[in-house]
């Protein structure tokens, strides 16, 4: 039996194929597929060819596809079915697979902060809630892109005499190989602006600077932590769980900044929701897609399944990055 | 004698030619020229052909070119000299011509807020100061783009249950011809994001909504007004004019929102700098370029010059838009 999970995101598209015992049968990774149909087409061709190298038009028992961005389900379905023949197909939001992977399919709230940010929760009755995640133009507070922009903003505010001096200036100049802020401006705005992922990557420098004692960097991360916690509080309110025990999963690269972001996150969360629990995600989103594909077959992963999967996943590094 | 001013901006490039008495000899308007060399080339070809329809390679006494964006002076000089032969050529920042036009070449501070925002000042001794204006990725607070983004953000925060309801929701949906917020998202992010000028254009809806009593819209404009006033205060501090009489010129489309932005602007400014004076700009930036071109010849515009220019400019509508 072939169970397939796909995590289609803004930076890559990942596919995992397992059997009914949680043994990995294949996997593949492709480019981003959140935005343009041609991207999705290319990514699907690549991941399914990697995952099923010896089979033309493979039949699979159940496939769950977690899509990001604004592509419509009908388009995803058409393209997926060009490459595989799923008996059951479930297309859903990527936040849904991310939460399922984090919580082993249990109720909870996932606070995701990568290049973008998004908060999604589901309760025992299946009621769903979504807060934020409206994209970089509208509302990306707490996301890597917003942290990177804040870093740049504070460097230039210090230059203006509007903000405190910060070692982010030297770090950012060094990172981009620029000698002056004018060169940095040229770099940032060339070709109508640096890609958002490159600006989001500056959040690593902010974490470094915070670690080295830079107050400006520490405050940027504290702001991000508070903002992300606020989305969790709104999600708890909307699910009617604000004064109950309910689990929150912080996920995504932004939380790798460690305690500089987790402490203000935790503090703000507990102030608003004293009984909330914070847990690290159990599995990555693509495994959440596997769980949801199993659910289509009325199956749940048992301990043997989870152990097999866990052991074999450790050998596939990219799934965890 | 031909005196030429050019205002090269992010939305258009404008050229004006006058004689030594302020009579208009020609003018032209072209596309944006702030970013790419090819844009600058096209815009220059267009404006100089319009301004000098019957002359091949015209000689001019003095030309001042106010450039926006990151194009280097050397490039601007090379391209300008393909089309005209200036005895004196002065290439400067577009904020410098904007202030010269606003203040008739007198000391002062120009607070510009169009699609982007920028604050520039100069004192009697010629000391210059610049605050903000680092572009939309880094710091555009108070600019039309930031007001438009705030409008979108508040619409979606209300949808999340994180903010107050606002009539901006209906206004924005109607403006883009969308029935739902999902359609609006598709519109905003199609082709990797709406052009910034289109998002900045939403600031008109914010002004309308404020006028109709919408608290969310009023607070967005108040925030913009306060933020822009803060840049003026920092500029005054840096020029050592914080407790002296010194003139501030608010300019650009954002200030057309009227008292909703001007009142918080004024209040914040006077709190920080009680002796500052606020005045409307006298002339548009392209006329400031004319003043600076005259200065290259050690000339100053006299009353006759200014009256002639003013009367004739009124017939050229686009110069004032």
Image (tube, coloured by chain):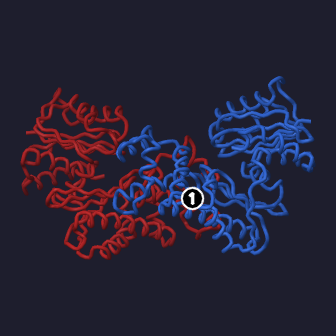
Chain colours: A blue, B red
Relative placement, left or right, of A235 versus B251 is: right
Q: If the image is split into quadrants, where does the C terminus of chain A sit?
A: top right
Is residue A79 positioned above or below B311 on the image? Answer: above
Relative placement, left or right, of A60 versus B198 is: right
Residue B163: image location, x then y, percent: 59, 68
Q: How many labels does the image show?
A: 1
Residue B200: tell me if it is visible: no
Most extreme residue toward the front is A212
Relative placement, left or right, of B239 versus A220 is: left
Disc 1 residue crowd, few under 14, some 14–19, many 20+, Cα 10 Å: many
Is residue B46 positioned above or below B125 on the image? Answer: above
Residue at 26% x, 47% y: name it: B93
Residue A50 or residue B191, whichever sits in front: A50
Residue B247 or residue A202, whichever sits in front: A202
Relative placement, left or right, of A255 versus A87 is: left
Q: If the image is split into quadrants, where does the N terminus of chain A sit?
A: top right
| Disc 1: which residue | A141
Q: Which quarter of the picture shows residue B56?
A: top left
Residue B108: image location, x then y, percent: 21, 62
Q: Which chain carries label 1?
A: A
Residue at 14% x, 51% y: name it: B309
Residue A137 or residue B57, whichever sits in front: A137
Residue at 28% x, 33% y: name it: B75
Is residue B288 positioned above or below B205 on the image? Answer: above
Residue B193 or residue A109, whichever sits in front: A109
Query: Circle 1 — which element?
Result: loop
Residue B120: image location, x then y, percent: 27, 57
């Amino acid at each position: 039996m072939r169970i397939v999970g796909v995590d289609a995101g803004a930076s890559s598209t990942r596919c995992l194929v397992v059997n009914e015992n949680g043994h990995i049968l294949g996997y593949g990774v492709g480019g981003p597929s959140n935005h343009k149909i041609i991207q999705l087409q290319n990514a699907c061709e690549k991941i399914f060819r990697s995952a099923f190298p010896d089979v033309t038009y493979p039949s699979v028992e159940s496939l769950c596809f977690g899509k990001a961005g604004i592509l419509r389900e009908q388009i995803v379905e058409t393209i997926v079915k060009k490459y595989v023949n799923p008996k059951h197909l479930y297309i859903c939001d990527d936040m849904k697979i991310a939460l399922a992977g984090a919580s082993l399919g249990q109720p909870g709230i996932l606070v995701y902060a990568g290049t973008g940010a998004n908060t999604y929760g589901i309760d025992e009755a299946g009621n769903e809630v979504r807060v934020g995640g409206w994209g970089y133009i509208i509302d990306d507070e707490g996301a890597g892109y917003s942290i990177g922009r804040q870093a740049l903003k504070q460097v230039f505010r210090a230059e203006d005499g509007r903000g405190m001096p910060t070692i982010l200036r030297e770090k950012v100049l060094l990172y981009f190989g620029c000698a002056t802020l004018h060169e940095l401006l040229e770099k940032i705005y060339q070709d109508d602006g640096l890609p958002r992922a490159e600006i989001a990557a500056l959040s690593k420098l902010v974490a470094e600077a915070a670690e080295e004692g830079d107050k400006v960097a520490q405050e940027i991360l504290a702001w991000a932590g508070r903002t992300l916690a606020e989305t969790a509080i709104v999600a708890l309110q909307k699910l009617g769980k604000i004064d109950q025990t309910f689990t929150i999963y912080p996920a995504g690269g932004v939380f790798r900044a460690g305690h500089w972001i987790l402490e203000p996150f935790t503090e703000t969360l507990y102030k608003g929701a004293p009984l909330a629990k914070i847990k690290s995600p159990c599995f990555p989103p693509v495994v959440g897609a596997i769980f949801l594909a199993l659910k289509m077959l009325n199956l749940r992963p048992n301990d043997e399944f989870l152990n097999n999967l866990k052991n074999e996943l450790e050998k596939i590094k990219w799934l965890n990055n």
